[in-house]
Amino acid sequence: MRGHGICYSSGMESTALKPIAPPEGIYDEMLAPGGDAVRRHYGAYADWLASNSAETMAAKRAEADLIFRRIGITFSVYGDESGTERLIPSDVVPRIIPAGEWALLEKGLVQRVTALNRFIADIYHDQAILKAGLIPEDQILANEQYQVAMIGTRVPHDTYAHIVGVDIVRHNDGNYYVLEDNLRVPSGVSYMLSNRKMMMRLFPDLFRRYHVRPVEHYPALLLQTLRDAAEVVTPTVVVLTPGRHNSAYFEHAFLAQQMGVELVEGRDLFVKDGYVFMRATSGPQRVDVIYRRLDDSFLDPLAFRPDSLLGVPGLLAVYRLGRVVISNAIGTGVADDKSIYPYVPEMVRFYLGEEPILKNVPTWQCRKPEDLRYVLEHLAELVVKEVHGAGGYGMLVGPTASRDEIQRFRAILERNPSNYIAQPTLSLSSCPTFVEEGVAPRHIDLRPFVLVGREVRIVPGGLTRVALRRGSLVVNSSQGGGTKDTWVVDLPEDSEDATSAVQSQTQAGQSQTQAGQTQGAA
């Protein structure tokens, strides 16, 4: 099925929608190579799309934008002096994943997050992986995110990262790869839930054509995960926010409301007699679990930044006594440092004795002289990222950068190489997206959310982020990206799909490892 660009305006004649094929060499989630055939799991959607017009889709998108704005689904951008809140565009074309593929992703995510939790426990206690020489000691012990205060501190069930967002991309070989791990304060789940609610409201007929696995139970799973983290019978849980000026404040308030727990700021909590209490109209109430949405350095002005007005004085002392749970734990940030990312496959082998199911992208660590030399020689071909960067800031996308931008970045990289890693410019998969030119291919990624309590649980799907600019690979909302509803759908023969997916991913991993070695990747 090959389409053509579609312009639409009020009063124009309705035209049936057909997706535009992506450029050659791009894996498209809906269209098979060549663009003339639709993948099986998109068949029913393609039929539905052909019966609708651009005007209908534009009206639905406008309705979604209006409702999102009315209920406050917005975000703000740091550095925007106007302080204007922005609407994250939500595309009306879903990203569909067959259950067979999801089975592979789910298994790989459980494996990866289990290994990461064991790694965090290890580096603050026995440090076996450092003694084994698998990771240089200075890369951990001198890391900005490594918290000395956590050395020897026990946390319930040895679970440090209760909520993990793992960014996954699909390459043009059709296989999935992990791009990065988010273990400090992973965000975006509110958009996953809001997108689903909106799609069910706007397109109920589509949900009658597909068996879409639900995500609406995520808040209940999150609350259970947080309660499981405590060692008291009926724990009191709160969500700790930096306040309404934080870019993700909507999500903080949304999750607190959905879980039925209090949303608090640091000034609402205090420490007394070795416990944390919340100020309430009925009097002080003990707090057992804090789902924190601010960084380590702001949590306790007595232990970290003395100028912090966002935290709770004395919180660390109570935490070290085991009388309050902080989720995610203090010091987890060392595991989502991008300079630690290349070692995750070794963590899986070291702690679990298994081969990684989900593979990494080959990565050059600029702190290594030989890797830096390669990166400087190939800046125009690579994506270079800050090791502590987020939101798409502080990075260079070589193939789309100008000569001047590359030269400026080269100078920055030469001054502080240990602050950067580099990766090949992946050919991210595309997904049909409703934009001005019609239903056109746009690059996407996927952030599933993994909850670690007494067991590891994942709602099927996650947040699909989409680069709305043609040809762009940057999906971050702060850089002009949008989001999509992610459907995991049950289809016939899914068990066969799962088997072939695992075999294909294993073969791809072997090929990718060989390619990385050839390129000198760490």
Image (cartoon, helix red, strand yellow):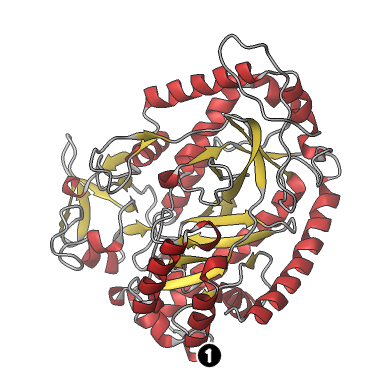
Q: Does the image show residue 501?
A: yes
Secondary structure beneath dot 1 equals: loop
Q: Quadrant of residue 463?
A: top right
The front one of 307 and 53 is 53
| Disc 1 packing (10 Å; few <14; some 14–19; many ≥20) | few
Placement of 8 over or under 515, stated as above or below? above
Q: In which quarter of the image is residue 139?
A: bottom left
Q: Where, quadrant-wise, is the C terminus in this rendering?
A: bottom right
Q: Where, quadrant-wise, is the N terminus in this rendering?
A: top right
The front one of 353 and 48 is 48
Residue flagged by tag 1: what amino acid is it? Ala
Residue 297 is situated, as x and y percent measured from the top left of the image, at: 25, 63
State how many labels appear. 1
Residue depicted at 36% across the width and 35% down the height: 86
Horizontal side of 34 relative to 79 (left or right) equals right
Horizontal side of 154 relative to 278 (left or right) equals right
> Circle 1 is placed at which residue position?
132
Residue 493 is situated, as x and y percent measured from the top left of the image, at: 86, 44
Residue depicted at 58% across the width and 36% down the height: 485
Residue depicted at 53% across the width and 39% down the height: 483
Q: Quadrant of residue 387?
A: bottom left
Placement of 417 over or under 2, stated as above or below? below
Placement of 378 over or under 278, stated as above or below? below
Tell which residue pokes out farthest to the top in this image. Answer: 11
Residue 495 is situated, as x and y percent measured from the top left of the image, at: 83, 49
Residue 164 is situated, as x and y percent measured from the top left of the image, at: 49, 56
Q: Does the image show residue 260?
A: no
